[in-house]
Amino acid sequence: MSTLDWRAGAGSALIGEIAVPGDKSVSHRAVMFASLADGESQVQGFLEGEDTRATAAIFTRLGVGIDASAPGSRVVRGVGIDGLQACADALDCGNAGTGMRLLAGLLAGQRFDSVLIGDASLSKRPMARVIAPIASMGGLIESEPGGLPPLRIHGGRALRGIEYTLPVASAQVKSAVLLAGLYADGETVIHEPHPTRDYTERMLQAFGWPIAFGAGWARVSGGHRLHPVEVRVPADFSSAAFFLVAASVMPGSDLLLRAVGMNPRRTGLLTVLRAMGADIVETPCGEQGGEPVADLRVRHARLRGIAVPEACVPDMIDEFPVLFAAAALAEGATVVTGAAELRVKESDRIATMANGLRALGARIDETPDGAVIHGGSLHGGDVHAHGDHRIAMALVVAAQRASGEVRVVDCANVATSFPGFDDLARSVGFGLRG
Ligand code: S3P
């Protein structure tokens, strides 16, 4: 990965109407289930990010025909639930925890062995959380010491269904176990400590696999088939989040974000920003791919610090970097607790955001599972994104209100989830240069 630094600051009011790219979680799953269906599926609105393209490339290497008919479109010639072919080489998930964890569950049910590798960041992320439940289903995944990638997944093993209570609220772990459950004998039942995004469950249902699920639980059994469908991927709420915060903090802003995916397990930031005083008006505009979508109009407002309710944490797990930026520019203190998972994301997001904002003059007290962010003003300086896409974008948002220029180092990984962020941001008034 080449390095890329940005210079950000001196932003103006954000004005205009934009659509952000397709949802990352939905795009990964659309390619996975379409690959396993009996026949040809279409995916529209596919995220052309490095993470999701890595997943599509892996399925190509496992014998699935995938054509990119146009940017954001894929035609996937599914090979059926048992039709994947072995690949002798390691399969590269890039930066994508979602790709690696879901594939671990799926590949544990195949007849053949596989190896999953990732980039430097993914190679430091915990995989024991999927290895352990797959082992109790009878699967075998070997890792490096400490449960780190690469993962060597042994195929040809008879899996059996389990009843499993997740130790952490994680849609990736839930999905890995459900995917292994498609290949298991009997029922697989999952219980979650807090409901997490349910795209795997919704999409299995859309592809015709019998599944029962509700808030915090899901149940599947093996031995069924997936029918090809057309998936329309909604715009990614997590990408919209950078613009929701930026327009909230930039005086004079009035920005419309079109047709954003509004799955309630993703929109915790909206609840929290509104509690902080944000002015965001939501106009529902139907469904895309079975997900509610809405236009979001956001105008500048004075934000006040709050204690973020712990119940909101899983519903905004990817939005904490940009919430930290909002909090650093709000009046009073914002208190985050119950968010220790942030320490094992693409970077340690509590530390990387606290260090970045401190370098711009913010006062932040870190705790093991969160932080107290004291709102105030920011100055210019050099900050490090540590190759974490959401840290880079969150620091660019914070920089818009800094009194001097901010150099954000190591931003190339923004392309993993939000290709074209810089051009889109500039088009509505961000101060940002490459
Ligand atoms: C995701 C689940 C979340 C989230 C990630 C995408 C998914 O991870 O942070 O960006 O698509 O299932 P965890 O399940 O590890 O919390």
Image (cartoon, helix red, strand yellow):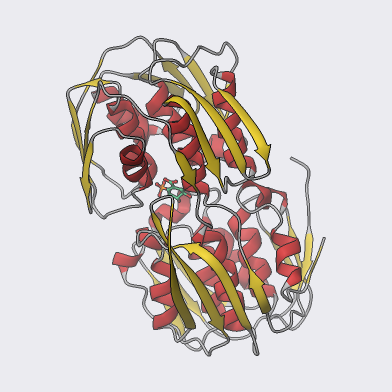
Residue 188 visible (yes or no): yes
Write the residue at 59% across / 47% down: 47
Vertical comparison of 119 with 291: above or below: above
Residue 200 lies left or right of residue 390; in this view the side is left
Residue 346 spot, x, y in % from top left? 55, 48
Q: Quadrant of residue 354?
A: bottom right
Write the residue at 40% across / 55% down: 291
Total number of numbered discs in the rendering? 0
Q: Quadrant of residue 139?
A: top left
Foreground of the two, 240 or 144 = 240
Residue 95 visible (yes or no): no
Residue 357 spot, x, y in % from top left? 61, 71
Residue 99 spot, x, y in % from top left? 50, 36
Residue 8 lies left or right of residue 112; in this view the side is right
Residue 413 spot, x, y in % from top left? 67, 48
Quadrant (top left/top right/bottom left/bottom right) for the N terminus: top right
Write the residue at 52% across / 57% down: 236
Vertical comparison of 339 with 67: above or below: below
Foreground of the two, 23 or 250 = 23
Foreground of the two, 119 or 250 = 250
Quadrant (top left/top right/bottom left/bottom right) for the C terminus: bottom right
